[in-house]
Image: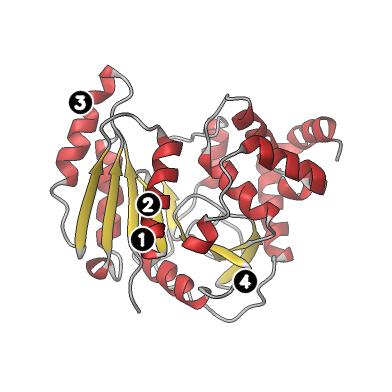
C-alpha cells in the first residue's frame, strides 16, 4: 500500500509544532511517507520571531521519506493556507492526510488514514477519513457520520473538489434543504451559527465550510470509535474552557480495525455524540437555536 502524502500546516507555535511532528514521527509508516509543510508568514511584527523559530526547527526534521517545506512569503491566514495547500497537494497526488500544528497523533493514526483511503477510494459516498473522535462509548472500531471534520483527516481529490469556499452559498443551500436541525446535530451544536459568523466575517473558518460542503452533498466521513488524535492547542471556536473539556480525550494505543460496515450515517454514533454535546452545552444552547432557526 502506497502511503498518502502528509500535509502539515504551521504558523508561530514552536513547542506545539515540535510535539506534533514528534508524534507523527512515531507513527507506523512515517518513514515511508512524504511530508509537505506549509509554513505561514508572520501577520504581525511580534510573530516574526516565533515564525522564524518554527522554520528553523522544520529544517531539522527527519524520519519521513522526504520533507518539503513551503515557506509563505506573506501571511495567508489559517484558512487560506489550508485551502491552498490541500488544493495543491491533492491536485498532484490525488489524496492527502492533513494535520495542523496543535494535534498529537496516536502511533496508529497514519495507518488508519492510509487504510481508510485505500478501502474507500472508490466509494463515492465517502468524502473523508477522520482521526479524532469525541470520548463516547461506541461499541465498534469505526462508524460513518454525514459531513466532514478537521482534527486530523484525509481525503481524495474527488472529495476536496466538493469544497465550497462561499459560506453564503452554503447557507442558502442549507435553507433550501431545510436541514439546519440535522446540520446542528439535532440542535445540539451551533454549526449553523459558526457558518453564519463566517459569512458575516466574524470568523474565518475553513473547517465549517468543509463540513457544510460535505453535508450538503450528503457525503460521509469515516471515524474511529476511539480517538487517534488529541488537540493540544487553544480552542479557536470561541467556547474556550467548556469546549476544551468537552473535546478532551485520550489517544488510543491500539490499531483501529477497518471492519466492513454499512456505508451510511450511524444513528447510534449520532445519538451518542449529540448526548455528549448536550450534556456539556445544556438546554440553553438548544433553546437559542430554536429561536434562531425555528427548529
The answer to which of marks 4 and 3 sits earlier in the sequence is 3
**Residues under labels 4 and 3: Cα distance?**
47 Å
Q: Is residue 100 left or right of residue 289?
A: left
Closer mark to the observer between disc 2 and disc 3: 2
Residue 130, position as x, y percentages in the image? 50, 60
Q: Which residue appears at 43% of the width and 64% of the height?
A: 252
Q: Name the secondary structure under disc 2.
A: helix
Q: Is residue 135 left or right of residue 114?
A: right
Residue bearing the label numbered 3: 49
The quadrant in which residue 72 appears is: top left
Q: Are marks 2 and 1 in contact (CB under 8 Å)?
A: yes
- Label ID, residue 88: 2
Snapshot quadrant of residue 31:
bottom left
Residue 49, percent from left and from top: 20, 25
Does residue 187 show up? no
Label 4 sits on residue = 139
Q: Is residue 280 left or right of residue 116?
A: right
Graded by Cα atoms within 10 Å as few (under 14), some (14 to 19) or many (20 or more), the crowding at tag 1 reads few
Secondary-structure class at tag 1: helix
Q: Earlier in the sequence, mark 2 or mark 3?
A: 3
Q: Which residue is mark 1?
A: 92
Amino acid at each position: 500500500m502506497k502511503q498518502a502524502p502528509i500535509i502539515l500546516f504551521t504558523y508561530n507555535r514552536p513547542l506545539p509544532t515540535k510535539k506534533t511532528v514528534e508524534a507523527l514521527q512515531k507513527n507506523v509508516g512515517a518513514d515511508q511517507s512524504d511530508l509537505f509543510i506549509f509554513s505561514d508568514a508572520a501577520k504581525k511584527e511580534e510573530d516574526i520571531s516565533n515564525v522564524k523559530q518554527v522554520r528553523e526547527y522544520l529544517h531539522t526534521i527527519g524520519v519521513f521519506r522526504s520533507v518539503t517545506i513551503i515557506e509563505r512569503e506573506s501571511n495567508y491566514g489559517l484558512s487560506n493556507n489550508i485551502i491552498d495547500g490541500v488544493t495543491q497537494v491533492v491536485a498532484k497526488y490525488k489524496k492527502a492526510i492533513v494535520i495542523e500544528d496543535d494535534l498529537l497523533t496516536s502511533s496508529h493514526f497514519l495507518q488508519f488514514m492510509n487504510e481508510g483511503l485505500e478501502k474507500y477510494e472508490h466509494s463515492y459516498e465517502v468524502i473523508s477519513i477522520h482521526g479524532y473522535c469525541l470520548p463516547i462509548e461506541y461499541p465498534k472500531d469505526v462508524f460513518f457520520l454525514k459531513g466532514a471534520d478537521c482534527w486530523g483527516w484525509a481525503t481524495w481529490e474527488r472529495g476536496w473538489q466538493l469544497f465550497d469556499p462561499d459560506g453564503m452559498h452554503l447557507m442558502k443551500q442549507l435553507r433550501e434543504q431545510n436541514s439546519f436541525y440535522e446540520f446542528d446535530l439535532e440542535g445540539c451544536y451551533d454549526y449553523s451559527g459558526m457558518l453564519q459568523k463566517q459569512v458575516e466575517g466574524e470568523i474565518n473558518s475553513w473547517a465549517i465550510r468543509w463540513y457544510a460542503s460535505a453535508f450538503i452533498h450528503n457525503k460521509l466521513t469515516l471515524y474511529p470509535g476511539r480517538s487517534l488524535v488529541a488537540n493540544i492547542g487553544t480552542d479557536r471556536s470561541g467556547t474556550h474552557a467548556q469546549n476544551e473539556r468537552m473535546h478532551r480525550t485520550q489517544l488510543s494505543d491500539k490499531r483501529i480495525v477497518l471492519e466492513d460496515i454499512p456505508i451510511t450515517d450511524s444513528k447510534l454514533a449520532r445519538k451518542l455524540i449529540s448526548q455528549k454535546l448536550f450534556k456539556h452545552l445544556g438546554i440553553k444552547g438548544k433553546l437559542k437555536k430554536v429561536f434562531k432557526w425555528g427548529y
